[in-house]
Every structure is written in C-alpha cells, then in structure tokens.
Amino acid sequence: MNREDWLIKVAEGMAPWFNELGYALPRYRIAIGFPSTGRRGKRIGECWVGGASADGTFEILIRPDLAVPLDVAAILARVRPRGRRAGVRAQGRVPHRRFGDRL
C-alpha cells in the first residue's frame, strides 16, 4: 500500500466522525505533494476548493517529507474540506473557520 492509498483509507475512517459533527464533506482527492508555498514553505498541508479543479473536486495536498503516521493523519483531519468556502482558491487564500472545539 502506498502513502496515498493509506491516506484514502484514513480519510474514509474519519468520514463518520465529520458527519456526526455536522460537517458534510464534498467530493475530494488526496495527494502527496508540496503545498502552494513550495518545498521551503512552512505549510504542511493544504486543501484547494473545488473551483480550482476542472471537475469541481476539492484537492488535498500533504507534504511528502512527513513520515510519522499519526502526524500525517492529524494534518489530514485539519485540512479536510469543510464546506464550499473552505480551502484555497486559485486566485488566493480563503480563510476557513476553526472547528477544533467541536472535535
């Protein structure tokens, strides 16, 4: 199993938790890659809104230089799309609401 397959399985396992908290998840894809800040940037994960993708799917990127599975899973939970306005637009950053106190 490669990293992306593992991330997909983790995301599928998290889906019921998000649903219980009232966060209906839009269609998304997960990939290993450097976020928009590049390799030297400090960003460890990023979610791009569906409008930035040709088929309207949200795109989640997790840095390839992260190796601790629990850390990677936590990053995935943090950057998961949480509605139409979450994530990053092609034209610039869109802030998203914090939801940590509901988890």
Image (cartoon, rainbow, N blue to C red):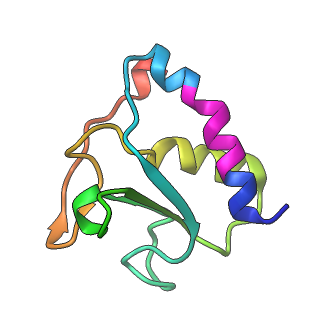
Q: Residue furthest top?
A: 20
Q: Is residue 13 magenta?
A: yes
Apparent side of residue 43 relative to residue 7 in the rendered image (left or right): left
Which is the main secondary structure of the residues drawn in magenta? helix
Q: Residue furthest left?
A: 91
Q: Quadrant of residue 26?
A: top left
Q: Residue at x 66, y 54 (%)?
A: 72
* The residue stretch that appears in magenta: 8-15
Provide residue 79's location: percent of width, then percent of height. 44, 49
Apparent side of residue 78 relative to residue 7 in the rendered image (left or right): left
Provide residue 2's location: percent of width, then percent of height. 80, 66
Provide residue 15's location: percent of width, then percent of height. 55, 30
Apparent side of residue 87 relative to residue 80 in the rendered image (left or right): left
Q: Quadrant of residue 25?
A: top left
Picture mark count:
0
Whether residue 98 is situated above or below residue 70 in the rendered picture: above
Whether residue 27 is situated above or below residue 60 in the rendered picture: above
Q: Residue at x 61, y 42 (%)?
A: 11
Whether residue 100 is situated above or below residue 47 in the rendered picture: above
Whether residue 64 is situated above or below residue 89 in the rendered picture: below
Q: Residue furthest right?
A: 1
Provide residue 8's location: percent of width, then percent of height. 65, 50
